């Protein structure tokens, strides 16, 4: 691989319905100099067969039981030997020039934060809003699809915490920014589409609880955060 090296990291489990779109978006990249690291949780459908037949030239794949998405993601990160990595869920897709665009600005920062679109068409942009109100989404548009991460950060910060089953990525991002002053660059492009069928999107109550606990642990005003948590919880329950 020339220049700064990049891995795409994907965690899967019985994802055969979603994978073809992701695979096609990888195959259509204008810059194909990346490695695809896949950790599968022991799928019983055709997920593993689809990955093996993807045609991605640089592929690392393991398939074995895990203890949840962040346990699997930590396994994947440990397999990464490139300078940077980008997380893609099985229901995500990349814009054709995403890898090329990320590589063009990668040397400037520890996090490269691009915009993403949700599967409903909403545009999410990074570096907007306040951390006390929006948490990690005030810094990055989305951990998956929209954030290129310097792999060596895990030596400094550690891996994704199993204490936050839905939002360990938010804890990682906020810890990096608030406690280690990592360099974040806002990139002026849309990296792709973020799928909303994952656990963090479906289990909204757990995600709200995780976000509240993370803010308190990292020193946010507890009464302010409690008020936000109660308001968000009420909204979620009434929807």
Image (cartoon, rainbow, N blue to C red):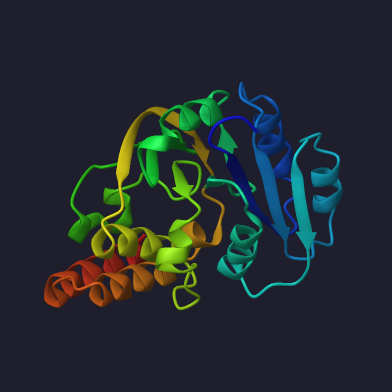
Q: Is residue 78 above or below residue 51?
A: below
Image quadrant in which you'd find residue 1: top right
Between 51 and 233, the one lying in front of the other is 51
**Image point (47%, 26%), residue name:** 101
Residue 122 in view of the camera: no
112 left or right of 178 in image: right
Give the percent coordinates (x, y) of residue 22: 66, 38
| Quarter of the figure with the C terminus | bottom left
Image quadrant in which you'd find residue 198: bottom right
Image quadrant in which you'd find residue 131: bottom left
Q: Is residue 96 above or below residue 116?
A: above
**Image point (67%, 24%), residue name:** 28
197 left or right of 59 in image: left
219 left or right of 195 in image: left
Give the percent coordinates (x, y) of residue 9: 61, 50
Between 97 and 17, the one lying in front of the other is 97
Give the percent coordinates (x, y) of residue 30: 61, 21
**Image point (50%, 76%), residue name:** 162
Between 3 and 10, the one lying in front of the other is 3
Check the image and name the residue furthest to the top.
Answer: 30
Give the percent coordinates (x, y) of residue 228: 20, 66
The total number of labels drawn is 0
Residue 51 in view of the camera: yes
**Image point (75%, 72%), residue name:** 65
């Amino acid at each position: 691989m020339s220049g700064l090296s990049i891995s795409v990291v994907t965690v899967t489990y019985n994802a055969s319905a979603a994978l073809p779109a992701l695979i096609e978006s990888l195959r259509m990249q204008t810059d194909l100099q990346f490695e695809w690291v896949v950790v599968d949780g022991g799928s019983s459908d055709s997920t593993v067969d689809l990955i093996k037949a993807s045609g991605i030239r640089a592929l690392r794949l393991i398939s074995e039981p895990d203890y949840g998405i962040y346990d699997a993601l930590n396994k994947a990160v440990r397999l990464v030997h490139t300078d940077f990595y980008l997380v893609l869920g099985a229901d995500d897709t990349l814009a054709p020039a995403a890898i090329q665009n990320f590589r063009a600005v990668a040397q400037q920062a520890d996090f490269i934060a691009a915009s993403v679109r949700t599967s409903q068409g909403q545009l999410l942009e990074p570096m907007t809003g306040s951390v006390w109100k929006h948490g990690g989404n005030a810094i990055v548009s989305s951990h998956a699809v929209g954030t290129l991460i310097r792999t060596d950060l895990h030596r400094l910060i550690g891996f994704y915490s199993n204490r936050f089953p839905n939002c360990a990525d938010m804890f990682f991002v906020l810890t990096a920014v608030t406690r280690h002053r990592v360099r974040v660059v806002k990139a002026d492009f849309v990296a792709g589409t973020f799928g909303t069928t994952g656990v963090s999107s479906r289990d909204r109550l757990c995600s709200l609880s995780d976000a509240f606990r993370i803010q308190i642990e990292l020193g946010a005003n507890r009464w302010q955060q409690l008020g936000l948590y109660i308001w968000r919880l009420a909204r979620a329950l009434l929807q």
